[in-house]
Every structure is written in structure tokens, then in C-alpha cells.
Amino acid sequence: MSTRRSKIDIIYDMLKAINDKGGKILPTHLLYKSNLSHKRMKEYLDQLMAKELIEETEIKGKKYFILTEQGSKFFVNYMKIKEFTDAFGL
């Protein structure tokens, strides 16, 4: 039986997907990589944009989500916390 992801885990997964794609990602790629429904992804995107962790931009007529400097800092710091807690099996 799988466990449900917490809100912070979902945010981490979304930021990781953007980071892994070089800091920008197409909405459909983010949808698949974050493993969310369209409605849930939209809710999280709205929150991430409100907190200025990501921005929406258009490049050559295509919509992308890009990781902001603040989003990148959050991602790096959360990754450190995650590695630390995983090292202790928490």
C-alpha cells in the first residue's frame, strides 16, 4: 500500500521536475512528472506563483513554468533537509 504525499512533498516534486528540466518546463511535462490531476496541479501552481517560487512565461508561443531565484533557494534548502532526515530514517 502506498502512502499519500504531503503538500510539501508535492511541492518538492513539482520544483524538482522544473529544476531537472533546466529551470523551465512545459505544463504537460510538469503534469506527468508531478503525478497530479490537472485540477490539483493548477491549485498548486497558483500557490507556487503567489509565493513567487515559480513564474509563468511564454517562449516562442509556448507556455512554460520557470523556477525563480527564490524557488531555487527553497528547492535547494528543502533538498538538504530531506537528505538529512532520510539519513536518520525519519
Image (tube, rainbow, N blue to C red):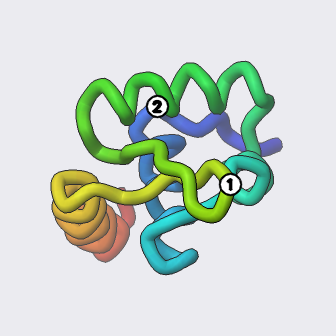
**View extreme (front): residue:** 60
In whole angstroms, how far apart are the C-alphas of marks 1 and 2? 31 Å
Could you say where residue 7 lies in the image, as x and y percent from the top left? 46, 31
Determine which of the numbered discs, if any, sits on residue 61 in the image: 1
User: Which residue corresponds to the image point at 43% horizontal and 57% vertical from the top-left?
Assistant: 66
Relative to 57, say whether 19 is above or below. below
Residue 69 point in image, percent of width and height: 19, 61
What amino acid is found at the position of numbered circle 2 in the picture?
A: Lys
Q: Between residues 4 and 60, which one lies in front from this camera angle?
A: 60
Q: Quadrant of the N terminus?
A: top right
Mark 1: amino acid: Gly
Q: Residue 71 occupies which quadrant of the picture?
A: bottom left
Q: Which mark is residue 34?
A: none
Residue for point 51% across, 32% down: 45
* Residue at the disc numbered 2: 7
Q: On the picture, is 22 further left or further right than 17?
A: left
Dot placed on the residue nearer the N-terminal end, 1 or 2? 2
Residue 88 shows in the view: no
Q: Is residue 25 above or below residue 64?
A: below
Q: Secondary structure at mark 2?
A: helix
Q: Residue at x 73, y 37 (%)?
A: 36
The answer to whether residue 81 shows anywhere in this view is yes
Quadrant containing the C terminus in the rendered view: bottom left
Q: Residue at x 74, y 59 (%)?
A: 29
Residue 41: give x, y in percent of width and height: 64, 32
**In the foreground, 73 or 4:** 73
